Each structure stands twice: as C-alpha cells, then as structure tokens.
Image (cartoon, helix red, strand yellow):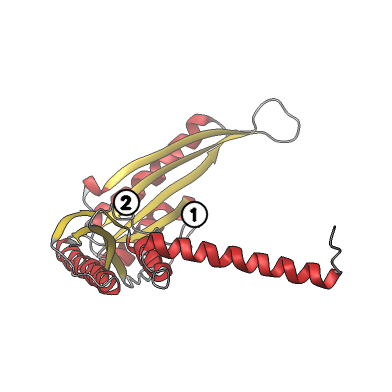
Amino acid sequence: MPVTLTPTQRGLAAGIAAAALLIGAFAAGAAQGGGAATAPGRTLAVQAANVTGGKITVTGTGVVSGTPDQLTLSMGVQTDGSSVSAALQRANRATRAVTTALARTGVRPSDIQTSGLYIQPDYTGSSVLPAGYAVGESIQVTLRTLGAAGTQISDAVRAGGNAVEADGVSLSLTGTGSLLAAARARAAADARAKAAQYAKGLGRPLGPLLSMSEQSPAPPPVLAPGAARPAATSGPVPVSPGRQQVSVTVTAVFALP
C-alpha cells in the first residue's frame, strides 16, 4: 500500500539522505588520503612552493640600489625654409653648433650619434604646391659625468638657439658588478629561506640545492619622456640623479628528502 508523506516529512527525509552522502564522501577521502584533517593545509603549501617528485622549487629576489652616474639625452633641431636646400642648410648649421658645443665641454665624439632626419613640405590652405619645407635632425648624446651634464646641456642649447629640441632623458648605472653581486647574494638567501619555511611547514627537512637559474633583468627606466623645447639659460640645467634599483630574481630547486 503506498505511503503518503507530508511536506515536512519529505524535507526531513531529503536532509537525512544528503547528510549520509556527505559522511560517505568524507570517509572515502580519509581512506584514500590518509587523514583528511591535514590534507587542505598540505595541499596549499605544495601549490605555493611547487613541491613535486621529492623536489621543492621557489623563487628568490634580491634588490639593492645605487646612484646613477650616466645620462642619455636625445637632442635635435627643427628649421624651415622656402626650399628644401635652405631648410636643410639651417638644420645642418644648428646641428653642427650643438655637437661642437658638446665636444668643447668634454663629450667624446663616440658618445654623439645621429639618430634621425626628416624633411617635410609645408602646405598652406588648399594649395597643391608647398609654401616651404621643414627639416628636423636629431642626435643621441651620452653624458658620462653627471657633475658636468647640466653645463653640457645648457651650452648645447645656447649653441643651437631657438631651433633646439630635447626629449627622452634617462639615467643609468654603469659598472654594476658589485651591485649585481650583492643583489644575487640576497636573491639566493631569499630563495633558501623560502624553501626552508615551506619544508618546515610540510614537516620535512630541506635537502641540498639541485639547481639555480637567474631571470633576465628588466631594462632601466626612462625618465622625463616627451619632447620639450628648452629655453636658453645662463646657468646649467639642474640634474638630480636620485637612486636606482638593481634587482635579481632566481629560481632555485632544492631536494626534499
């Protein structure tokens, strides 16, 4: 004879069935994993430290800072004229004046490099014939003595006059051997400390280092981007070197007995 259940009785029966399913799943997991209470924490540690096959892989980072000692600057001139020849002659004269001033202040010829040239017609209104031409020439300059860089820039600007433009100033560190050595030592120590922490969390001893690789460093940042026409000044351009970081990141693999 069929049995009719009330809504309350049906809800109670469904709850008991769901509880039975959960208890069964827990029991099966405990039998396969050897202790369900510690499994979640151990799983998180393994994922973060990348523990596989008796090895633990971690990354370590070391950062040190130094004072930049070199400045790179893009300079150029812009001129115009009624003809290509006239505009180009003016640009050539201004560029030679800039490079001569730089050489006079101690910049080596090898640190002055031509980086760009353009010639462009200038149309007025709806005319199909150009009313004139504009010419731009640019150079890349490396200034290796920051104490003199401000004077060198000012002298070059005055020599080129109102035709001069400048952009893309960047400061960099040279001779970074000792800084890199310090950063590498910190990165290696950081990797070992992380590996030891994870091994301790897993309740296992940390074995010897099996391998270590260094990632490629990031390029130095470029400061003050964007073109700007510097005004003629009687004093040197202020140059503030600030501090620049040298960073090393390594990937280390340790044995995990």
Picture layout, residue 160 above or below residue 120: below
Looking at the rendered image, the quarter that the N terminus falls into is bottom right
Q: Position of residue 41 (x, y in %)?
A: 40, 71
Residue 141's mark? Answer: 2
- The residue labelled by disc 1 is 162
Which x, y percent locates residue 98? 35, 50
- Image side of residue 145 versus residue 92, left or right: left
Tell me the distance, in whole angstroms, between the alpha carbons under discs 1 and 2.
Answer: 19 Å
Looking at the image, residue 55 sits to the left or right of residue 33; the answer is: left
At 49% from the left edge and 45% from the top edge, which residue is drawn?
A: 78
In the rendered structure, which disc, 1 or 2, sits on the residue that comes first in sequence?
Answer: 2
Amino acid found under the numbered disc labelled 2: Val
Q: Amino acid at mark 1?
A: Asn
Residue, x 38% and y 55% (percent of image)?
Answer: 159
Give the image location of residue 241, x and y in percent.
Answer: 32, 70
Which class describes the residues within 10 Å of circle 1: few (<14), some (14-19), or many (20+)? Answer: some
User: Seen in the image, is 192 located left or right of residue 51?
Assistant: left
Residue at left offset 55%, top offset 34%: 120
Q: Position of residue 163 (x, y in %)?
A: 48, 50
- Crowding around mark 2 (Cα neighbors within 10 Å: few <14, some 14 to 19, many 20+) is many
Give whichever of 19, 54 is nearer the camera. 19
Above or below, comparing residue 37 to residue 143 in the picture: below
Dot label at residue 121? none
Given residues 176 and 117, the one toward you in this image is: 176
Total tally of numbered discs in the picture: 2
Q: Quadrant of the C terminus?
A: bottom left
Q: Callout 2: helix, strand or loop?
A: strand
Of discs 1 and 2, which sits in the foreground?
A: 2
